Amino acid sequence: MTATTAVVTDSTAYLPPRIADGLPIRVIPLHVIMGERQGEDGVEVSPDDVIEALADKAIKVSTSRPTPEQFVDHYRGLLAEGYERIVSVHISSELSGTWDAARLAAVQCNSDVGTEVVRVVDSRTTAMALGFAVLVAARRAVVGARLDEVYEAAVGSLSAGSNFFYVDTLEHLRRGGRISAGRALLGTALAVKPILHISDGMILPLEKVRTAAKAIARLTALAAASANEFDAPVHIAVHHLGALERAEAMRTELQQAVPAASEIVISEVGAVLGAHVGPGMLGVIIVPELTRPDAN
């Protein structure tokens, strides 16, 4: 069956390579600025580029949204390819202006044709919490689901998951304006390792742990407890920035601790989240399997 609805997202979904093969998904990159250099997140700027830039305190790392015009071009391109409808799901509007740019573009495209052909979703999250919602929606689309069904699949996935993040240092949160300089200095002096989560669309502190080893163990325990609360199978993503070995070790532990996990993928984050959390970050996303790929 040919999909009539396409799903658009942005580069902050951090979809692992090849996971979207065969699905009607289009990823629009955010733009990354590192001093005098700039480029598309995940296309012209890699995680290694971001790690290198963050190590130099003289280089300011920031991001900017795609423009509404870029979204219009992508939407029109998909419609020209034969798709009849588009569900566009994006990073929290509290963290980026990407959703607003997509919304403005949808208004224009819908006005051009006189009916709703593009529907935009503010995910209120990012990373694979966003990515899993995109995959769920696209898997519904590929079996012929209508616009409303694809939209509801994405929204249902977004409302059900949980997420936890660990960072090696508070410095990048300070540089990104997420915490005060005083709190960052105090946290460094006390060797505090914060565990964070995304709630109400924002990155917020959840717990403070005194050592890296204890923080990673606590992160794993929180993720396992959350995953085991669901009656359904769960999808899990382990995120990292420059910490692949840690991520692989965490995946192994979660495979043992969460027997209901239908998949555990590893995905390295890029500039948008990486600029705030820094190298060494570990994160876990848990989303229950609400819709199976072959659902009718």
Image: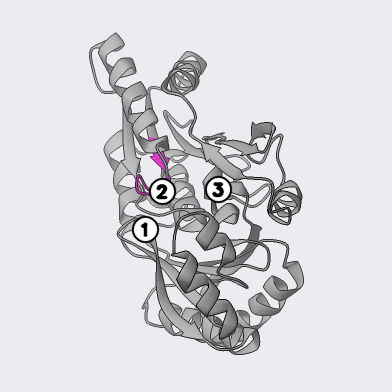
Residue with the mark numbered 2? 95
Relative vertical location of residue 10 with respect to residue 157 in this rendering, above or below:
above
- Residue toward you, 168 or 88: 168
Q: How far apart are marks 3 and 2 (CA)?
A: 9 Å
Q: Distance between the residues labelled 1 and 2?
A: 7 Å
Relative vertical location of residue 13 with respect to residue 110 in this rendering, above or below:
below
Residue with the mark numbered 3? 272
Q: Tag 2: residue type?
A: Leu
Q: Residue at x 45, y 17 (%)?
A: 69
Of callouts 3 and 1, the N-terminal one: 1
Crowding at label 2, few (<14), some or many (≥20) Cα neighbours within 10 Å? some
Q: What span is in magenta?
A: 88-95
Q: Residue at x 61, y 86 (%)?
A: 256
- Residue toward you, 61 or 15: 61
**Relative horizontal placement of residue 116, taking residue 221 as reference (left or right):** left
Could you tell me residue 197's position as x and y percent? 42, 68
Label 3 sits on a secondary structure element that is helix
Could you tell me residue 26's position as x and y percent? 54, 33
Mark carried by residue 175: none
Quarter of the image where one finds residue 28? top right
Say if mark 1 contacts mark 2, CB within 8 Å.
yes
Q: Which residue is drawn at 34% across and 16% down?
A: 109
Of callouts 1 and 2, the N-terminal one: 2
Q: Which residue in the rendered view is the most extreme toward the left?
A: 114
Could you tell me residue 167's position as x and y percent? 58, 71
